[in-house]
Image (tube, coloured by chain):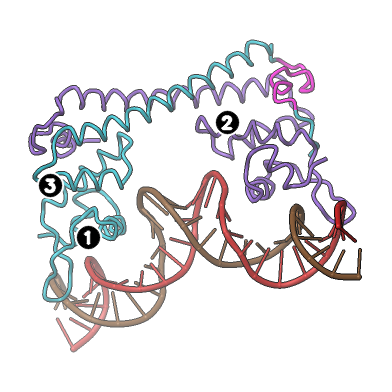
Chain colours: A cyan, B purple, C brown, D red
Amino acid sequence: MLTRGELAKLSGVNRETIRYYERNGLLSVPARSEGGYCLFPSTAVKRIHFIKRAQAVGFSLDEIKTMLGLQDTDDATCGDVRALAQERLADIERKIEMLTAMKQTLLDLMSDCPGGDRPINECTILESFSNHESV
Amino acid sequence: MLTRGELAKLSGVNRETIRYYERNGLLSVPARSEGGYCLFPSTAVKRIHFIKRAQAVGFSLDEIKTMLGLQDTDDATCGDVRALAQERLADIERKIEMLTAMKQTLLDLMSDCPGGDRPINECTILESFSNHESV
DNA sequence: CTTGACCTTGTACCTGAGTACAGGGTTTAT
DNA sequence: ATAAACCCTGTACTCAGGTACAAGGTCAAG
């Protein structure tokens, strides 16, 4: 069994982050020692690593909580998990599309403006934002 | 000239959002009517649209402020604008790369797991969140 | 000249994902 | 037996990007 500080050290997150995860139901309520210290099972380290890896591919803590819940649900299926992943994927693809469009816009703007020491009022990039509010 | 409410309506954002943009230097300090009402130039609508478009692809308000701020800099040259655009372009490309990596990770996970009605304890997606050492 | 719709300012609140203390209790080492 | 090092709870704060009032001022219509 691990204290909160030990768990924090072993899992590589802040002690307060662990409290935060507890508050938000991502870690189950820990056992207590005589003196009132939290005692986490050593498997909690794995659980936190799970959380961190899922975050790294774009899942929110809420979604991660759902996935952790699925793990404890006997009638949950791979399809349920797959559906969550599919949503994340669609989200990521949408973002990539938007960024690609913005990139093209910037490239177009840049190819129109030769740059160099031309004064700013001749800049075709700023012209395209064409906005003459002062100061 | 537009009041704050008119600007809000025309640009499709909340009146309070306009105040927020003002406070944070994304809109220049508005003129005032006799009675103390803000008077925005009608070009402010365009400016807000630009802010919203840039936000939509992941630019922060700080980044947007820098972009918009160029036009208020008297000694700036086209080269300066171009350099900034180049930075934003690099930013966008980095973001696209990160998202593409996330996407690939998700695709890999999903192709390993057939989904369907397989029980959750056989799910290779969850397994992979639980088992890898890094990320 | 009053009503209602609009405007002003300041301040407080919201989400997400944490982080930072304060003020107190416990455990361990010397 | 006492100090250091840890732990507890509760609350408040961070950042971004807003949103929501309240208390009061202004403007136009009837």
Say above or below: B69 vs D19.
above
Helix, strand or loop at disc 2?
helix
Say above or below: A32 vs B17.
below
Q: Amino acid at mark 3?
A: Thr
Q: Which residue is mark 3?
A: A73
In front here: A10 or A59? Answer: A59
The N terminus of chain B lies in quadrant: top right
Q: Amino acid at mark 2?
A: Ala
In front here: B94 or B34? Answer: B34
Residue B120 point in image, percent of width and height: 11, 38
Q: Which mark is residue B54?
A: 2
Give the alpha-carbon distance from disc 3 to disc 2, as whole Å. Answer: 42 Å
The image quarter in which residue D17 lies: top right
Q: Chain of mark 1?
A: A
Residues drawn in magenta: A116-130
Q: Which residue is mark 1?
A: A5
Q: Amino acid at mark 1?
A: Gly
